Amino acid sequence: MVEWLAGNRIRGTSTERTTTTGFNPVAAVSGGWVEVGRTTLGSAGDTITVSGLSDKRYHMFLVDQKATGNTNIGSQFNADTGTNYSTRASINGASDATSINSTSWAGNWGSAISTNAFHIGNISNLSTEEKLTILHSVYQRTAGAGTSPERQELVGKWTNTSASISSMLWKNTDSGSYDTGSELVVLGWDDSDTHTTNFWEELDSVTLSSTNANLASNTFTAKKYLWIQMYLRWDDKSGDGLITFNGDTGTNYSDRHSYNGGSDATSVSSPNFKINSSTIKTSALVNIFTVNNSANEKLSIMHVNGVYTAGAGTAPDRRLESVSKWANTSSQITSMNVQSVEGGAVFNPGTTIKVWGSD
């Protein structure tokens, strides 16, 4: 007899499972992003190293960076200190800067980082090819919602074509140190993986069944790292989306954003942060990563693909490349709400929010 278990797992014979579902659910629920290494500093220091990484085709990594004094960033693979790295980066939407024949691929921020920062990146890790990296970063700057955070978009490469990545170093290149609790987490993914220990745990999923001016999550379990995905559908009226956490509508949010590659704009001491810098009429895909420590401001990195007019005759908009902070320093995020505003626009049925998390 087939028995449904937590996490959409099924117990029963292979024949029973296939008959019930039309496919083999073991293949459907196995694999995914698995934690392959983590280092958390027990005292202040200049380096965070994760070694003994298993050979995975792709890596994702998260850095919860805390500062004591002035810090900056650099990164190396496999203890390679040679001039085998290059990068291209933009800070706060400024013109790209490049670095070639370098000893590190992450590169300096440009000015010292003296408070908290959050980084999330992806790596293509084929042993016979150069290793390609993508990095998105948010820097808290001065504490409080009265100051907007800063952002960095960076791509890099390690020119090694003879080995896969087995270790990763995150290093400080300034006069201060990374503070106690700073952390580097490395995940791995292969299409042949059969594990069931996914790093990203589904915490909540809500899909609207009727029109509504609000898309509200349920209360979900607090986790240190959050990955929030949304698909928003408007009722063919120009709309915008305003995000709040834990029901807080006070002036405790600030953000920095760019619309279609334009100059950065900032918002400080706001009662929310926006999904759009203009309005969307049809739909939007939203992706947010957040570091969610109770005692620290909540730093988020968001990317939005917004569609105003359906059809191939109109290009979608990079509605926002955005970083934001919620200045709360006493509790973790356990719920969120997106309010549709502008011109009476509401969300259509099928609008969805899904929250993933991990500690």
Image (cartoon, rainbow, N blue to C red):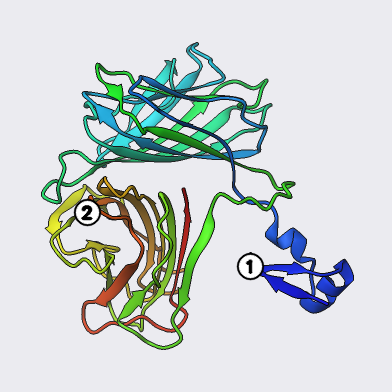
The answer to whether residue 84 is above or below residue 117 is above
318 is higher (above) or lower (below) than 234:
above
Residue drawn at x 29%, y 21% as measured from the top left: 177
* Kind of residue at badge 1: Ala
In percent of width and height, residue 18 lies at 83, 72
Image height check: is 129 above or below 100? below
Task: Determine which residue is flagged by label 1.
Answer: 6
Direction right: furthest residue: 15
Quadrant of the image for the N terminus?
bottom right
Mark earlier in primary sequence (1, 2): 1
Helix or strand or loop: what does disc 2 sit on?
A: loop
Depth check: give the residue in front, 348 or 169: 169
- Where residue 241 sits: x, y (%)? 28, 70
In the rendered structure, the answer to whether residue 83 lies left or right of residue 190 reads left
**Residue 159 at x, y percent in the picture:** 56, 21
Residue 205 image offset from top left, x and y in percent: 48, 71
Given the image, on which type of amino acid does mark 2 rest?
Answer: Asn
Query: Which residue is denoted by mark 2 in the rendering?
Result: 328
Q: Nearer the viewer, residue 225 or 352?
A: 225
Instruction: Tell me if 229 is positioned left or right of 329 in this view.
Output: right
Query: Image quarter for residue 188?
Result: top right
Residue at image position (19%, 38%) is 141
Q: Residue at x 68, y 26 (%)?
A: 128
Residue lying at the far top in this picture: please name it: 82
Q: Nearer the viewer, residue 155 or 298?
A: 298
Numbered disc 1: secondary structure: helix
Q: Marks 1 and 2, how far apart in space?
A: 33 Å
User: Toward which corner of the image does residue 131 lie, by quadrant?
Assistant: top right
* Count of residue discs: 2
Quarter of the image where one finds residue 208: bottom left
